[in-house]
């Protein structure tokens, strides 16, 4: 599956469910965007290598500001929801003031997966070291910068689709 096309599902599922990682949401230059869409799906290992390289050499290397939203109880859905609400407000404020923000939550997702599967906490330890406190759990790392090019819209669900 091509990480640029959709890291989670196929393109038709992105259209149906309105989520997933897409090429358009990556803010590539126009030529890379067009070229990536024309490529066949790549093997998983190659996708993973490209993803890691882009995080290291593009997303992290070019960001002058990093942040981390943390909670006291990582198992509290209420605290996770409030974290999401805070992120939304911050992101809307940044957009209004012409800043670009991007979640960098892969480390947190991996740490959660390690806990779920009772694996060696490689990402969990790295996240703990990043936060620097046993009383807080980081759940929303992000970067902020002035945008260098416009990003196209990522898939969004309609309001009616997310009501409980």
Image (spheres, helix red, strand yellow):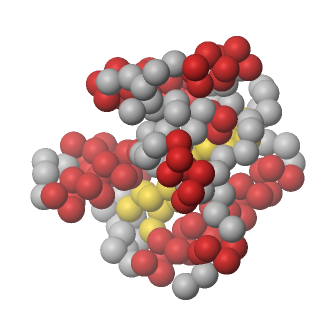
Instruction: Residue at the far front: name it.
Output: 12
Q: Is residue 67 visible?
A: no
Which residue occupies the foreground of this view, 126 or 59?
Answer: 59
Image coordinates of residue 102 in percent, x first then y, are 62, 44
Snapshot quadrant of residue 58 = top right
Image coordinates of residue 127 in percent, x first then y, are 35, 48
Which residue occupies the foreground of this view, 135 or 36?
Answer: 36
Residue at image coords 36%, 69%: 74
Residue at image coords 53%, 42%: 11
Instruction: Residue at the far right: name it.
Output: 97
The N terminus sits in image quarter: top left
How many labels sit on residues? 0
Residue at image coords 58%, 20%: 38
Where is 4 relative to 15, above or below?
above
Image coordinates of residue 125 in percent, x first then y, are 25, 47
Q: Is residue 155 visible?
A: yes
Where is 20 relative to 138, above or below?
above
Residue at image coords 48%, 76%: 79
Where is 137 relative to 2, above or below?
below
């Amino acid at each position: 599956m091509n990480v640029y096309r959709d890291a989670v599902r196929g393109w038709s599922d992105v259209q149906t469910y309105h989520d997933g990682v897409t090429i358009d949401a990556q803010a590539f230059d126009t030529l890379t965007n067009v070229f990536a869409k024309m490529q066949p799906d790549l093997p998983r290992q190659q996708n993973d290598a490209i993803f890691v390289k882009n995080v290291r050499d593009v997303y992290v290397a070019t960001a002058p500001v990093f942040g981390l939203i943390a909670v006291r109880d990582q198992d509290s859905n209420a605290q996770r929801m409030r974290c999401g609400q805070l992120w939304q407000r911050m992101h809307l404020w940044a957009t209004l003031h012409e800043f670009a923000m991007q979640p960098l939550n892969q480390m947190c997702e991996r740490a959660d997966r390690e806990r779920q599967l009772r694996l060696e906490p490689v990402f969990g330890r790295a996240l703990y070291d990043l936060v620097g406190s046993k009383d807080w759990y980081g759940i929303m790392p992000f970067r902020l910068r002035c945008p260098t090019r416009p990003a196209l819209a990522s898939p969004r669900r309609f309001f009616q689709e997310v009501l409980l």
